[in-house]
Amino acid sequence: MSWVICRGSHRPLEPTSLPLRSWAMLRKRSSLILCGTFLFITWNAILVLLLWSRPSPGRLGEPGQEQRDVGERPTNDVVGDVLRMADAFETELEMQKEILLQIQNHQSLWESPNRDGPSAVTPRQQPVIPILVIACNRVTVRRCLDKLLEHRPSAELYPIIVSQDCGHAETAEVIRSYGDQVTHLRQPDLSDIAVQPQHKKFQGYYKISRHYRWALNQVFKTLSHSSVVIVEDDLEVAPDFFEYFRALLPLLKSDPSLWCVSAWNDNGRDGYVDPGKANLLYRTDFFPGLGWMLHRELWEELEPKWPASFWDDWIRQPEQRRNRACIRPEISRTLTFGRQGVSLGQFYDKYLRYIKLNTEFVPFTKLDLTYLKEEIYRENFDKEVYSAPVVTYEDVKQGQLKGPGPFRLQYSSKDSFKVLAKNLGIMDDFKSGVPRTGYRGVVSFISRGRRIYLAPPPGWTHYDTTWS
């Protein structure tokens, strides 16, 4: 038996549509499949030719052999030869079948997801999630961009768009230094905004709101993306930042009770989160921001009524939120390093600088996240919170809790919430009546290693907007 060495050929795909590794795998897979098919067809053709060209029965060299009547009955020896050839033919078919099965098995392995990394599906088959970096006059945007580029698994799936306001030359030079790794947009309207005299000190908030509107229109209307993750120039991202948003995009699009996914936990300081629950996610009625994803349909809803200033407080109002929730993590996937800004460092020294940034890569795209769907989540959450034993502030503060928890600490008014929150070290403010990280009025955090639910009495129905 002779072996045929063959090389597959196929029409090349566009080289820019695939990473080099995927391109090489596709070439190898196509070559092997074509090689196996060629072997199968060639061998069978040879067998047919052998059968076709075989001399007719009889003694070799016998005179007049070629002119014998083809209808003559064959001898027993000829029948035996044919049977032996049929057996050999069947054996060879089995061998060829085995080869093709092996090729098919390898093909299924190549097409299966990589256990240690992102799926082997080509970028063209996955939705693109652009990262919009809102920049102004911080040259430290380099720290933000360096981390994004360090952790980004695919330039095709996660294009980075830096939208710069302010016209700050040094910051623009930093952004330009990244070349084609990022897309640099410049907000064209740098003029001052006419405001009431008492709002003159808030001019920066007006410009930020104007910039957000312009930048999001560029992403959704000019560049025609269907979703976006927004980060500001003073945020550092975690290693699984991209994985987190990739996994939650389908849920955001399919669940109308959700309107955003955030990478931020307002009470995510070290000691207030469970370090062993990096994979734990929540629904929250509070819009967290600080690294968040929205889809085009939400922007089409919000853009016509976008506010002149204070867009983040505006988006938290009941008229915009419309009883929708966001997803947020137990451990933040972003960390802010920008103490100075238009807010003049509000909350930074007391809370924000101590936020714990996740360092453990969680393969969210391989996890079952159906527990975050509204009906499932609400039922399980209410059951866990209101079946937890009620404890007092003194029990919590003095470490006198018995058992592993969770425990419920109850508040009944705005003032009682603020006193308990302040004394326990979590954020105590409200926006449109919603406490930070709250879900149905409940704030979840860790105190002295135990889960505490700071919760209203059973039977909670709605937020009171006067609690602000």
Image (cartoon, rainbow, N blue to C red):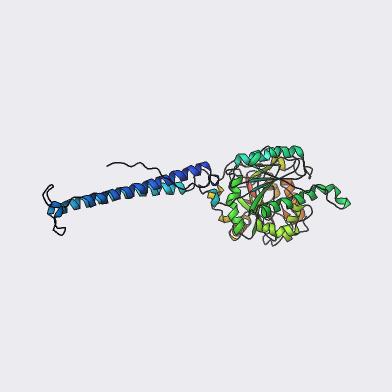
Query: Depth check: 335 or 285 in front?
Result: 335
Q: In the figure, residue 333 lies in which quadrant? A: top right
Q: Nearer the viewer, residue 157 or 453?
A: 157
Q: Residue at x 42, y 48 (%)?
A: 107
Residue 263 visible: no
Can residue 462 be spotted in the picture?
yes
Residue 451 drawn at (x, y percent): 63, 48
Q: Nearer the viewer, residue 404 or 271?
A: 271
Q: Residue furthest right?
A: 197
> In the picture, which quadrant includes the N terminus?
top left
- Left or right of 169: which side holds 62? left
Give the percent coordinates (x, y) of residue 158.
Answer: 61, 46
Q: Determine the image quadrant of residue 376.
A: bottom right
Q: Is residue 170 left or right of residue 367?
A: right
Residue 407 vs residue 344, the one in the foreground: 344
How many numbered marks appear?
Answer: 0
Image quarter in which the C terminus is found: bottom right
Residue at 67% across, 58% down: 298
Image position, residue 358 (x, y; %): 62, 42
Location of residue 183 in the rendering, given as x and y in whole percent from the top left corner: 67, 44
